[in-house]
Each structure stands twice: as C-alpha cells, then as structure tokens.
Image (spheres, rainbow, N blue to C red):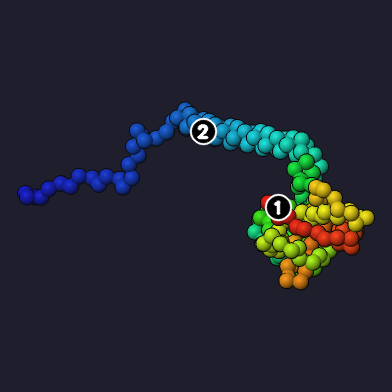
C-alpha cells in the first residue's frame, strides 16, 4: 500500500559490547596489583611498628640507666603548694613521694607532718626538712629546746623567726671575759616586753641557762 512504511526490526534491549569485557589476563593482572598494594601497606605498617618498638626500648633503657645512676630512692614529704612560715600542716598541704637519695637535702623530715608548724616558709614541690618543721605553737624542731631570757638593755629590733647570736661577757665562775663569747645561735619564737623566748640547739641549752645564772646574755641579730 502506498504511503506505508516498513518498520525496521526492533533491536534487542541488551547489547553486549565486547570492548568492555576483561580478559582473564587483565583480571589476573588487576588482582596482582591489588595484592601488591596490600603487601606494600603491610610492609609499611610492620616497618612503623618496628620503629616504634625500637624507640620505646631506647627510651625505657635510657630511663633505667638514669635511675640507676641516681641510686636508690627514699620516701619523702613534699609540699603541694607554697606554704608560709607558721603554717599548721594538714591534709592537702603535702604529699608522700619518692626521690633519689643522691638528690635529697640533708635532714629530710621523717615524721608525720599532720599538725606540725612550719618554722620557715616552703615552696611547692620542696622536700620538707627538719630545720623547716616545728611542733606546737612555737615551731620547735626535734633538735631544739626553748629557753627564755630577759630582754637585754638595748635589744635589736626582733621579730618571730629572726636568727640571733647569744653573747655573754660572763664566764661560768662569774668573772668577766673579754672579748664577749658567743655561746649559742638561736631563733626568736616569742617577743614581749618582759621576756624573749628562743629556740636553741638542745646541746647548748644548759650553757645558756648557766650564763643566765651568773650574768646576762645579749642578742646579736644575724642575716640568717
């Protein structure tokens, strides 16, 4: 019939493009590349792990060598913050830790710090020592005794905590001695118009009492 047209046969919905197919050789090559990348990452991870282990071993060995060179350690009382002179120690003011014995000051405090009074100020992280510790309101340490003397005729301006020299011009037999003799060092505990209380080394306390019995004691203020 005129005017009619012939339709071409319909194409199949799916066409296979042979150019996009992977050959078995290409698949094998791709798998080989993937495995190669994985192996390289594994090798890199193993290398990094070995490096970390080597560095860790070196750091630990160096720390052990340092600790060994410093010698054995000892438990000490350390201030946790700056503390003023006259402060009454309580929980939170100090901590117990260990320090190498070779780095410790002399006279490390060995007792219970609770309720002790500081005779001198201490800084945070400072090891507490005998000469900075006291007991009771006077702040005496274990190697001291308190003595009371009448005020000298012309005493220096004294305050609690001042370091002084105790000087006498009287010998134990009552005779005058020249020049004046220093019989002890002391630390001022209490100052009043009637008396001065001093902390002196325990071994010289009797000498101070003897000097008072036969004469008088003058005080010399020192920079300490």
Residue at 59% in and 35% down: 48
Residue at 79% in and 44% down: 101
Q: Among all residues in the image, which is located at the extreme left? A: 2
Residues marked 1 and 2 touching at CB (< 8 Å): no
Give the percent coordinates (x, y) of residue 72: 81, 42
Give the percent coordinates (x, y) of residue 201: 84, 55
Q: Is residue 89 visible?
A: no
Out of 178 and 157, give the one closest to the viewer: 178
Out of 124 and 141, give the one closest to the viewer: 141
Residue at 25% in and 47% down: 10
Gap in angstroms between the C-alphas marked 1 and 2 = 80 Å
Q: Which mark is residue 180?
A: none
Residues packed near mark 1 inside 10 Å, few (<14), some (14 to 19) or many (20 plus): few
Out of 151 and 29, give the one closest to the viewer: 151
Is residue 196 rendered to the left or right of residue 33?
right
Image quadrant in which you'd find residue 189: bottom right
Q: Secondary structure at mark 1?
A: loop
Q: Is residue 194 visible?
A: yes
Which residue bears the numbered disc 2? Answer: 37
Out of 29 and 95, give the one closest to the viewer: 95
Give the percent coordinates (x, y) of residue 92: 70, 64
| Of pointers 1 and 2, the one earlier in the residue sequence | 2
Is residue 1 rendered to the left or right of residue 108?
left
Q: Which mark is residue 222?
A: 1
Position of residue 94 relative to residue 182, above or below, is: below
Residues packed near mark 2 inside 10 Å, few (<14), some (14 to 19) or many (20 plus): few
Q: Secondary structure at mark 2?
A: helix
Residue at 87% in and 58% down: 211
Image quadrant in which you'd find residue 55: top right
């Amino acid at each position: 019939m005129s005017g009619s047209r012939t339709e071409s046969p319909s194409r199949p919905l799916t066409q296979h493009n042979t150019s996009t197919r992977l050959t078995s050789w290409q698949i094998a090559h791709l798998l080989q590349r993937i495995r190669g990348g994985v192996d390289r990452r594994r090798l890199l991870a193993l290398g990094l792990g070995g490096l970390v282990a080597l560095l860790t071993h070196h750091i630990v060995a160096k720390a052990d060598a340092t600790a060994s060179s410093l010698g054995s350690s000892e438990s000490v009382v350390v201030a946790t913050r700056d503390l003023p002179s006259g402060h009454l120690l309580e929980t939170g003011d100090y901590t117990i830790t260990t320090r190498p014995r070779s780095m410790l000051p002399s006279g490390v405090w060995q007792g219970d710090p609770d309720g002790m009074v500081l005779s001198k100020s201490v800084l945070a992280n400072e090891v507490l020592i005998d000469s900075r510790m006291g007991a009771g309101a006077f702040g005496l340490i274990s190697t001291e005794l308190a003595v009371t003397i009448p005020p000298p005729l012309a005493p220096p301006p004294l305050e609690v905590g001042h370091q002084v020299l105790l000087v006498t011009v009287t010998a134990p037999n009552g005779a005058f001695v020249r020049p004046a003799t220093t019989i002890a060092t002391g630390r001022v505990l209490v100052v009043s118009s009637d008396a001065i209380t001093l902390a002196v080394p325990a071994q010289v306390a009797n000498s101070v009492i003897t000097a008072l019995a036969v004469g008088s004691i003058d005080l010399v203020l020192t920079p300490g």
